[in-house]
Image (tube, rainbow, N blue to C red):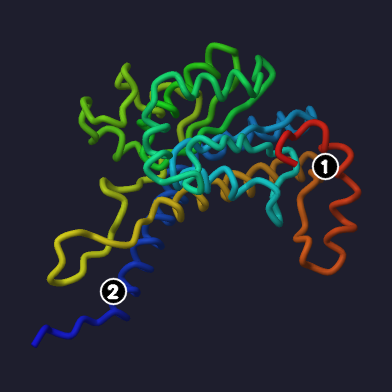
């Protein structure tokens, strides 16, 4: 008779892992988060957009987390490229994120320039589309902020098939790197009697780091006497009316609106 597994304890262990990771981001990444927030505040004070791109599978969720989201900054413009979305096929998504040159096409199409800022969010910080996006944006003079796991990138073999031909890591290319601390393999729960870990953690890490960045940015703006426009949930009372005050200001500037 197989031994009974305490699923409640496993879930509690997962919660503890998520909390521990978020606590590490909060305490250990204070300096880069604050530096990045200062640059975002400058960008928004100048009424310029903050672009975000999350190339690769579930990393696309990171760009969606802070775009057109209740409590989110209206100046955030997500680059929602169809290529690496899981909705177009999971295996296709993985193949595209490993295709050298693809990220350069996406950034070129976004027409970023010297006054632009780009946040690149990716769980592991190594795939070819991500690195090409960073290199292309840098060549165009954009300011780069990276949100990824330094540990995962540094401990992934140079010959891993996901890597860019240069073998570069995202944190080595960007102007400011925010480390999400995601461990190798991403999944963090071990079930007794099973060989593979389950329950990935990177989506929590990305979302927490990015929302901390938004919080710090808004705090800096408010300290300067600037109340930035933020989205209100359209499902909340008065939400549509509150958002409508700003739609015309961003509709022709943010491509995905």
Image spot of residue 199 (x, y percent)? 33, 62
Q: Residue at position x 76%, y 52% from top?
A: 231
Image spot of residue 106 (x, y percent)? 56, 25
Of residues 188 and 100, the one nearer the viewer is 100
- Quadrant holding the N terminus: bottom left
Q: Which residue is mark 2?
A: 10
Tell whether 134 sits left or right of 186. Answer: right
Of residues 208 and 163, the one nearer the viewer is 163
Image spot of residue 82 (x, y percent)? 55, 37
On screen, residue 115 above or below 186: above
Residue at disc 2, secondary structure: helix
Tell whether 5 sits left or right of 203. Answer: left
Q: Which residue is mark 1?
A: 225
Q: Residue at position x 75%, y 42% from top?
A: 257
Q: Residue at position x 40%, y 51% from top?
A: 202
Of residues 224 and 176, the one nearer the viewer is 176
Image spot of residue 137 (x, y percent)? 55, 19
Q: Which disc is residue 176 wearing?
A: none
Occupied quadrant, residue 248: top right
Q: CA separation, marks 2 and 1?
A: 46 Å
Q: Residues within 10 Å of mark 2 (few under 14, many from 20)?
A: some
Residue at disc 1, secondary structure: loop
């Amino acid at each position: 008779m197989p031994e009974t597994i305490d699923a409640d304890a496993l879930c509690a262990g997962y919660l503890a892992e998520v909390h521990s990771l978020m606590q590490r981001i909060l305490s250990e990444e204070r300096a880069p988060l604050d530096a990045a927030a200062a640059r975002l505040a400058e960008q928004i004070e100048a009424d310029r957009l903050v672009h975000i791109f999350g190339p690769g599978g579930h990393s696309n969720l990171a760009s969606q987390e802070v775009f057109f989201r209740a409590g989110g900054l209206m100046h955030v413009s997500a680059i929602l490229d169809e290529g690496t979305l899981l909705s177009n096929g999971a295996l296709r998504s993985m193949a595209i994120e490993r295709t050298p040159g693809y990220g350069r096409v996406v950034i070129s199409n976004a027409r970023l320039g010297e006054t632009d800022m780009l946040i690149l969010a990716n769980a592991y910080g190594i795939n070819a589309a991500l690195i090409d996006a960073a290199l292309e944006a840098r060549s165009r003079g954009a300011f780069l902020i990276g949100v990824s796991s330094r540990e995962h990138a540094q401990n992934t073999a140079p010959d891993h098939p996901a890597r860019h031909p240069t073998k570069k890591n995202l944190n080595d290319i960007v102007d400011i790197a925010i480390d999400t601390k995601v461990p190798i393999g991403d999944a963090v729960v071990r079930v007794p009697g099973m060989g593979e870990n389950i329950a990935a953690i990177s989506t929590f890490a990305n979302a927490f780091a990015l929302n901390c960045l938004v919080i710090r940015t808004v705090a800096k703006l408010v300290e300067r006497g600037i109340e930035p426009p933020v989205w209100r949930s359209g499902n909340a009372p008065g939400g549509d009316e509150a958002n409508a005050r700003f739609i015309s200001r961003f509709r022709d500037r943010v491509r995905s609106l």
